[in-house]
Amino acid sequence: MIPGLKARVFSLHDVLMYLAIARKHVRLMALLICFSLMCGLTFYIFARPVYHAQALVRVEDLARPLDAGNIYNDSQLQTVAMQLTAPNILERTAHALGIDESNRDLQEKYLTKISTRFNEDRNLIVDVWVATPDLANQWTETMVREFLTSRSEKRVKDRDLIVKTYSKEMEEVLTRLDRQTFDKSKFQDARGLTEALIRLKSINTLPDDLARLRTRIDEMGRVRVRLQDPALENDVVAKLSLIASIEEKGDAPLRVGQAVATGGEDRANNLAEKKPADPNGTSVIVVPSLVKSPRPWDALLQEQQQLKARIDELSKKYLPANKNLAEPMKLLADIEEKLEAEYQVAQTRFDLEFQEAINKKNDLEGKIPEYDEIKRKYDKLLAQVALYDLSRVPYEAYVAEMNRKKEGTEFAGEKERVNLQYADLIDKSDRPVSPNRAKLVLVSLAIGLALSVAVPFLIEYLDHTLTNLEEVESAFRMRGLGIVPQIDASSVGAAALINRDESHKDALIENFRVIRTNVLSMGSMTKEPHVIMVTSAMPKEGKTVVSSNLAVSFAHTGARTLLIDTDLRRGRLHRLFGYRKDPGLSNVLLNEVSLEEACRPTGQENLTILSAGRHLESGTELLGSPRFREVMQTLRERYDRIVVDTPPVLGLSETSIMQTLVDGVLFVIWTGNTPARSAKSAIDMLAANGANFYGFVLNRLDLSATANYYQYYYYSHDYYYQHPLENA
């Protein structure tokens, strides 16, 4: 795992750790860089050459009120630029240039890349990368030509299809429209709309007629009032003029033979008081003399004026009794009588018309309820028809729209909005632009450098073995008692044991002194380390060497120390000291030998060993027996320190069984080899059985590795060599 990965602050120590990791993987890093450069060289050798050409295509963009772009929706600038490089256009271009390939094969063998963009003049810049220089120089011109041809052909087909489709649709729509019109007519007839319309039209003018009659009656009433003015009592001409003025506005003159009801009372009173006519009263028949005629009294009025002028002239010459004045006076009297008669006739006609207007007004007012009922019924029917129209399909609009589109297609089919015209080549190259040697070298080198950093980093990140003392302490919440450097692989047997008389083992001796001191200090916080179990998660993690050297280190202090091998299946402790495996613990538990015979002294002062004895597959039952408990109790009384070398925890039960017979556990971890998950499982299993942990030891730590050297410098041989140890 990468050192310092979980550190909060990036320090010089972390820099040295990463440099050490780089040194550790330097061969791999060099190999990755060489591999990347070799891949780049291989690509350069086998990659096809690519030639580049850049061409200018002028774009004419003229929007018309009605053009092909509005019909086919294919004449936007961006749309044209995309269609120009569409797969079908590329295939047509290749075929025109003598290449009969599909679009996929074309891009694999000939066409590497093609791009279009607009310049500041809104013209197209086309870049092509192809396999040959001739193809690069001719591609854009041919592509523009094939695009225009393809667009023209497609529009002819689309136009014919639109016209054909719309014609067919229009026939069907017209048929449905006729059926719909017939259904609407049936609907209106079923609801009586036509009958209601006829009835409404028959009295539709009733409100207007009634309003006009009321206005005329008011005007005639005002004339009647003026006719009764005393100031006009002797002025027949003025009265006739008033009657004539109102008669000229009349629109319903009397007819000969017409009966006008007078109400049965005094006609003058009825007319003056505007009382309605009584249908049971008397009526007046209109005679020819009462019918309106063109002002016959105008001639009498003119003749009267002439006679008055003549009489005035004669009055200047003659006396009133003169016979020359008598004849004109007589004629004037006759004319005045005729004017009076005309006035009487006009007044009678005026009164009859006034009464007739009142009668008509009464009749129309009587028809108002009928008019309202007919109007309400007609409006209701119109609302029903409107709802019916909302529920029907608007075929009329469809026909109009199809006619518009059909005519627009035929008119605007040839009027282009956006047109392309090939101009010329802007740039061309006779030498391939790809693969570029310099660029390829730089890219390969960059990829190689990236891989040389990423792969070692990934390897270290994915390394779930335990290598760092602080990380293990943080992960398992257990104290690190120390480290054990990796012993030379050639060291076997007694060579793996520490001896303070051997100066070349000073560093190893000091390592175990540190472990011994830390174990004793932990005893002050938990249980006194009288009986210490040394175990590990898996086999071959070096617990036998660690337990042996720890026992030797205890013996160096002058403590009577016993080293016990409890691996009754395959114990190897006796080999370190050059003894046979029996007699040993299994023989004692089987009562084959006495405890004194099984405990044998070693070459180390104050150190005794009890080997495993005869190997048994039923070792678990023996270690859990009361006999083993008695043996351990006896040994506690005889020795100051007892170090118990046990089988691995995972997969075996001996270690868990012995928890009640020991004071604490020293856990051995093989640096860079023991998986973190296995170590955690073993520690959890021991904790579940009540184990008291003194701590752990990182075994077989390679101090020659740069990363470990920087991290564990104070445990290294150089440190102890520079500072010689005094005899302990």
Image (cartoon, helix red, strand yellow):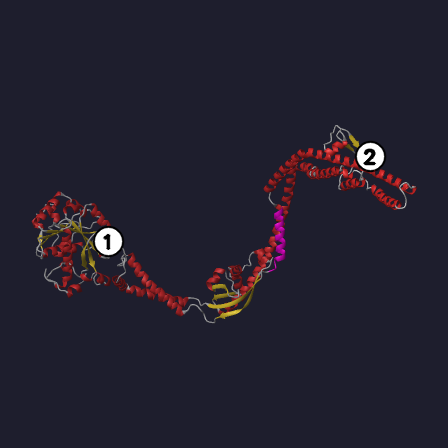
Q: Quadrant of the image for the C terminus?
A: bottom left
Which residue is drawn at the image coordinates 32% and 62% (left, top)? 453
| Identity of the residue drawn at 63% across and 42% down | 180
Residue 591 quadrant: top left
The N terminus - image quarter: bottom left
Q: Is residue 261 visible?
A: no
Give the mark toward the camera: 1 or 2.
2
x, y percentage for residue 33?
33, 66
Determine the CA span between mark 1 and mark 2: 136 Å
Residue 585 x/y as whole percent: 12, 49
The total number of labels drawn is: 2
Task: Indicate whether 171 appears above or below 114.
Answer: above
SS at mark 1 in the image: helix
The stretch drawn in magenta includes residue 407: yes
Q: Earlier in the sequence, mark 1 or mark 2?
A: 2
Q: Would residue 712 be found to the left or right of residue 250 on screen?
A: left
Q: Position of residue 686 (x, y in %)?
A: 20, 48
Name the image quarter holding residue 368: top right
Query: At label 2, which amino acid type do we have?
Result: Val
- Tell me the magenta residue range: 396-415
Q: Which mark is residue 311?
A: none
Q: Are marks 1 and 2 in contact (CB under 8 Å)?
A: no
Residue on which the image places disc 1: 474
Viewed as shown, does residue 67 lie left or right of 437? right
Please give the name of the residue rendered at 58% of the width and 56% of the height, measured from the top-left corner: 70
Disc on res. 287: 2
Secondary structure beneath disc 2?
Answer: loop
